[in-house]
Image: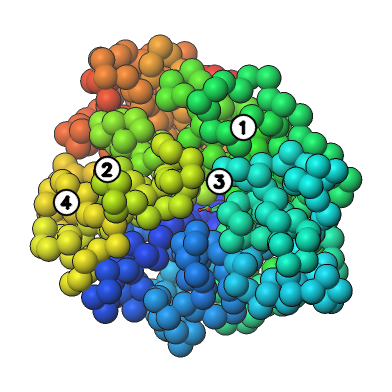
Amino acid sequence: MATPHSGEAISRTWWQRGVIYEIYPRSFQDSDGDGVGDLAGMIRRLDYLRWLGVDAIWLTPFYPSPMADFGYDVADYTGVDPLFGSLADADQLIAEAHRRGLKVILDFVPNHSSDRHPWFQEARALRDNPRRDWYVWRDPGPDGGPPNNWRSVFGGSAWTLDEATGQYYYHAYLKEQPDLNWRNADVQTAMFDVMRFWLDRGVDGFRIDALRQLVEDDQLRDNPANPSYQPGDNPYHAVEPVHTTDQPETHALVRRMREVADTYADRVLIGELYLPIKRLVAYYGEHGNGLHLPFNFHLILTPWKADQIAELIRQYEAALPPDGWPNWVLSNHDQQRLASRIGDAQARVAALLLLTLRGTPTLYYGDELGMRDVAIPPEQLQDPVARRVPGHGRDPERTPMQWDAGPSAGFTAGTPWLPVGEHYQIINVAAEREDSHSMLTLYRRALVLRRAHTALAIGTYGAIESQDDVLAYVREGDGQRWLIALNLSASSQGYTPAEAFTGSMRLSTHADREGETVRDTLTLRGDEGVVIQLDTGTAPVKGRQDG
Ligand code: NOJ
Ligand code: MG
């Protein structure tokens, strides 16, 4: 029977209750000494993930690819690049993960293929090839140049001229990543078949790449100039992508993808969508016919200030549709490392935030160790974006996972494809496992606590508030109430909720207050975050109730 604060305990499924861990396959574990991670290496590390206490892994692409964008240029949607292994290895990974109770989420890259994909090879061969319309072709503009002003996210025009056939093709990203034409019904059918191919093999869902780019304006209207653009900003932002992103047609296509997923039991669809909250939540669809989890990147985009994050949480909760389940992301393979963005001490506070907010957390590999961005010498740069849009390369956050203090941090017996972080002899799994004050221990303890307590995993919110630099909220469920108080500054801060409380400290960033009894008011040291189990029977901590 549901009690007032039951937190909807019974009905939640794995992707609501669980924690997702993002793996960048090139950088997780190499097994054959070529310096690039692979599926066999990943299988060897599944026990670590189980020990850590995550519930699902999301793998960025491992499909056959010329690697112009490190796998996001797919030449065959239903295979495995030999660099990573074979289809048999993928099957084994799925089976071994499932054996350990871990779900497997793959990256689905529907917006574009590789220019080496047979579909594009056929499309570009002849104007009247039936595959021509699988991509987005247009005649040159009146001056012979590109058809309009659309820009590539990775710099330059989004149009490339195919000399042989005299037309331009559209690519939201690199010219090696031509956009598929989702207005073509055969493209839709082929891509839904790709989803079924992997779902039939047992994968538990997809993270859908570049979803906001899926459809473009069919009238090819120019994008308007961005009035707030400053010289020196990323040139992509010189125009506002109003005709190239988040087009209304995308929602109907998402519904079709959802129909495919719903013919299988308990699968999840997650969408990569850098969008303002209002437009983001539209991707839940109506009555749950859209995505399960439109990725919420707003913690990455919001200044690290208590009042702004409290406001973000309230706005996001208020915007969610009634059946929409929240989710939070702190970093990924396209963003600066968390510890580099907000500092090592705040990264610990952020760990408690991520794992105690209401909604599914996604954790980026290595963040649980406190891995930082690695400075890459110019001659070792790999990411094409580093050359095309200086300052925006993504190599620093994609360096090898740091397993131990041995050569190449235990990642490879060969030469790693990107250099290993300079502090790897301290920041690594083997060392941090033994250290009760390490980032890894903090993550693991937070994951254990979350798993053990329904209120933390899937409970509702009580108050959500900020006082000076302290962000605080209450989680309720299963007859329990928890207070999370996080000091987002380096100086000591007091925090006094509106109403009296008593409770017991269960977890803290500084790992030295567990068991402490607290009452009515808190003093937090600089960069300190605490998770408090409130005594039942204490009057509710009053605050705004949103959502
Ligand atoms: C988003 C992916 O996360 C990023 O790594 C990739 O370069 C682009 N989409 C293009 O696929
Ligand atoms: Mg597109």
Tell me the amino acid under the disc marked 4. Tyr
Q: Which residue is mark 3?
A: 154
Q: Determine whether the residue tagged by mark 3 lies in a helix, strand or loop.
A: loop
Does the residue tagged 3 have its C-beta within 8 Å of any atom of ligand 1?
yes
Does the residue tagged 4 have its C-beta within 8 Å of any atom of ligand 1?
no
Q: Which residue is mark 4?
A: 424
Dot in front, 3 or 4: 3
Which mark, by number, is residue 278? none
Is the Cβ of the residue at disc 2 closer than 8 Å to that at disc 4?
A: no
Q: Residue 233's spot in the image, x, y percent?
A: 53, 28
Q: Count residues near mark 2 (Cα–Cα under 10 Å), then give few for <14, some for 14-19, many for 20+.
A: some
Q: Quadrant of residue 89?
A: bottom left
Marks 2 and 4, Cα distance to the nearest angstrom?
13 Å
Mark closest to the chain's N terminus, 3 or 4: 3
**345 or 425: nearer the viewer:** 425
Q: Residue 49's spot in the image, x, y percent?
A: 33, 63
At x 36%, y 33%, the residue is 341
Marks 3 and 2, Cα distance to the nearest angstrom?
21 Å
Tell me the amino acid under the disc marked 2. Ala
Q: How many marks?
A: 4
Q: Which residue is mark 2?
A: 375
Q: Which residue is mark 1?
A: 237
Q: Quadrant of residue 319?
A: top right
